[in-house]
């Protein structure tokens, strides 16, 4: 029985060893394709290297385009009707140009009466002066009493006063008649018109608005920390909504900072505003020379979970994910502010499909792409 049990145990052990060998063989057969797949490249890529350049040193800002100065044009006459409009919104006018006319018939008649009154007063003055001169000549002879002589001299003075009064009334009527012509106080562009034909105006009624000399400016908002870097004459560049750029120069920096926003205003003259419109909110920047920058194409940058990464290609053609800090952007390139390994190669594009440790196959970039990366 003991011999039989020993033989049975040995047989069972042999069967177990055989089964174990078969299991290992099956597992090896299953693991072989997986190992082959792991060794296969995940993606075919091109690589780029960082480039050292000198980039402009700038400070970005936002703000509105506005009129340099806006003149309010109103009426000075009282209770007159608007009978003619000669200017429309958008018209470029010269200084002194007639923009509108008020009814002037009554004032014209008043002016004619004043002229007639002045002529009458001047005639009376001429007679009074003749009588006074005769009295002065007869005074030594005693032909006229002192009382009569005084009456002639007083009449002369009264006539002179009446002439002065008539001249003053004539001047006032001329001023009132001139006020029926609404004139441009300066050259510029009509930006608004509230005048309507037939309206009865009163003193101070706004009829037009005028952008003086057609000059526009950009009122940029900057944090207090950046205001100290801006000086009159600092160049600025605006990016208009349609994609065009506009050049300007700082005219003045506001002496105060808003207590709520902690921002201050910088007034930028726009010598040639082109198609810029007052009220447009635009972005721009101020230039302060240039400084060194390490740059890469923006396509090499991968953004994950709010952070920026580069995929470095190691000598064994595996990739390593590097977290970096980015700075300025210019065209299709971006500044990398984090230190980078010397002579490191980075995945040029498509890095979003790769994970840390993936193997890649590096190929040469097409000539056009290679030239663009340089």
Image (cartoon, rainbow, N blue to C red):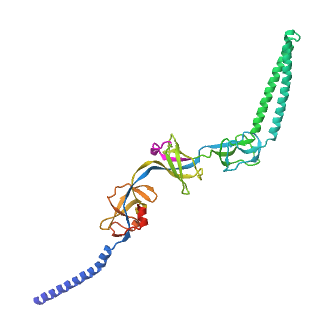
Q: Is residue 302 visible?
A: no
Residue 190: x percent and y percent?
A: 66, 48
Q: Is residue 105 above or below residue 361?
A: above
Q: Position of residue 243 (x, y in %)?
A: 54, 57
Judge from the rendering whether residue 122 lies leftward or rightward of residue 270; answer left or right: right
Question: In the figure, residue 156 lies in which quadrant?
Answer: top right
The quarter of the rendered structure image containing the C terminus is: bottom left
Residue stretch in magenta = 217-232
Q: Residue at x 13, y 88 (%)?
A: 7
On whether residue 230 falls in the magenta region, the answer is yes
Residue for point 78% across, 35% down: 173
Q: On screen, 48 above or below 54? A: below
Residue 227 is inside the magenta segment:
yes
Q: Is residue 1 left or right of residue 286?
A: left
In the displayed structure, would residue 349 be above or below residue 5?
Answer: above
Query: Which one is nearer the viewer's eye here, 96 or 267?
Result: 96
């Amino acid at each position: 029985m003991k011999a039989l049990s020993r033989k049975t145990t040995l047989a069972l052990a042999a069967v177990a060893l055989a089964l174990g060998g078969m299991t290992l063989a099956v597992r090896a057969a299953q693991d072989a394709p997986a190992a082959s797949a792991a060794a296969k490249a995940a993606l075919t890529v091109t690589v780029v290297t960082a480039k050292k350049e000198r980039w402009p040193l700038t400070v970005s800002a936002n703000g509105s385009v506005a009129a340099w100065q806006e003149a309010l044009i109103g009426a000075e006459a009282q209770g007159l009707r608007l009978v003619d409009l000669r200017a429309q919104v958008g018209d470029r006018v010269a200084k002194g140009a007639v923009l509108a006319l008020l009814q002037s018939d009554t004032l014209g008649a008043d002016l004619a009466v004043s002229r007639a009154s002045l002529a009458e007063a001047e005639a009376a003055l001429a007679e009074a002066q003749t009588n006074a001169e005769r009295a002065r000549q007869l005074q030594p002879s005693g032909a006229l009493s002192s009382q009569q002589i005084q009456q002639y001299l007083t009449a002369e003075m009264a006539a002179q006063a009446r002439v002065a009064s008539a001249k003053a009334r004539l001047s006032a009527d001329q001023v009132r008649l001139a006020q029926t012509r609404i004139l441009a106080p300066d050259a510029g562009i009509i930006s608004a018109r509230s005048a309507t034909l037939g309206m009865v105006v009163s003193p101070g009624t706004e009829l037009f608005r005028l952008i003086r000399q057609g000059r526009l400016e950009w009122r940029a908002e900057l944090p207090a920390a950046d205001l100290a870097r801006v000086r009159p004459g600092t160049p600025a560049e605006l990016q208009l909504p349609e994609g065009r750029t506009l050049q300007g120069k700082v005219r003045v920096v506001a002496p105060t900072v808003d207590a709520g926003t902690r921002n201050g205003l910088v007034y930028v003259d726009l010598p040639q505003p082109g198609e810029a419109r007052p009220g447009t909110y635009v972005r721009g920047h101020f230039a302060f020379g240039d400084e060194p920058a390490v740059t890469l194409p923006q396509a090499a940058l991968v953004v994950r979970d709010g952070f920026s990464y580069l995929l470095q290609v190691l000598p064994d053609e595996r990739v390593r994910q590097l977290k970096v800090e980015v700075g300025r952007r210019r065209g299709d390139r971006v500044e990398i502010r984090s230190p980078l390994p010397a002579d490191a190669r980075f995945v040029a594009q498509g890095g979003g499909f790769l994970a840390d440790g993936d193997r890649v196959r590096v190929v040469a970039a097409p000539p056009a792409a290679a030239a663009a990366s340089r």
